[in-house]
Amino acid sequence: MVNMLHVFYRHGQANISRFGPTRPAWTFLIAKWQIPMIIREAADTDKDLLWKLLEPVIRAGDTYALPSDYSQHEALDYWLDPSKKTYVVEDDGDLIGTYYIKANQMGGGGHVCNCGYVTGTKARGRGVASRMCEHSIQTARERGFRAMQYNCVVSTNEGAIRLWKRLGFKIVGTLPKAFHHPELGDVDAFVMYQVL
């Protein structure tokens, strides 16, 4: 069993304490809203709530290079694929975010990981994405990854790009017209990278 790590964010500082044996999770208390968020591994019982998070993002088709007509079964198979370790952000019994982490390549590229993040529509603006990214960076280090790479950050996803840069990622490549945006047509995509 692994100790639960609770991190309470107040006034920009983290106070860390360890509690008794339990499943791995981080709890964040965001001072502005005083709402605790638990980040934990996804379970089979999360599938219906996960689909509620994933479906609007997949249907919009403006940030992920996934078919916008994916069925629930196809989307969950992708997000929960055994090659990935998938986490969810839980708030008062509801899921408000999710991310996965996996090796970006095999063999000589296996020390670099890749992640995908989705924040629930109602939870945007509450720091959920930044907490997931911080958690994923810590998880990557614990799992022995030495770098993190985002393969296809759509150039029109300006909020995500600002966040990733703030958290230490750099644009290391531009893929000209590599993503077909449903409203804007073909737009650039970025490769973003951070050494851990």
Image (cartoon, grey):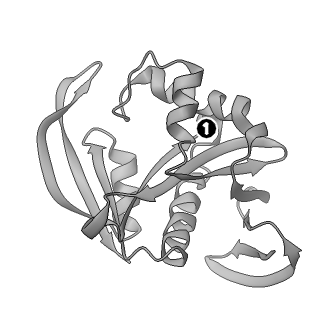
The residue lying at 66 percent from left, 76 percent from top is 11
The residue lying at 38 percent from left, 60 percent from top is 164
The quadrant holding residue 178 is top left
Q: In the picture shown, does residue 46 fall above or below 100? A: above
Q: In the picture shown, does residue 159 fall above or below 4? A: above
Q: Which residue is mark 1?
A: 120
Q: Is residue 37 left or right of residue 74?
A: right
Pick the quarter of the image with the N terminus: bottom right
Q: Secondary structure at mark 1?
A: loop
The quadrant holding residue 53 is top right
Q: In the picture shown, does residue 69 fall above or below 177? A: above
Q: Position of residue 163 (x, y in %)?
A: 41, 58
Q: Residue furthest right?
A: 20
Q: Give the residue type that dot 1 points to.
A: Gly
Q: Position of residue 132 (x, y in %)?
A: 56, 58
Q: Position of residue 161 (x, y in %)?
A: 33, 52
Q: Is residue 163 left or right of residue 134?
A: left
Q: Position of residue 32 (x, y in %)?
A: 70, 60
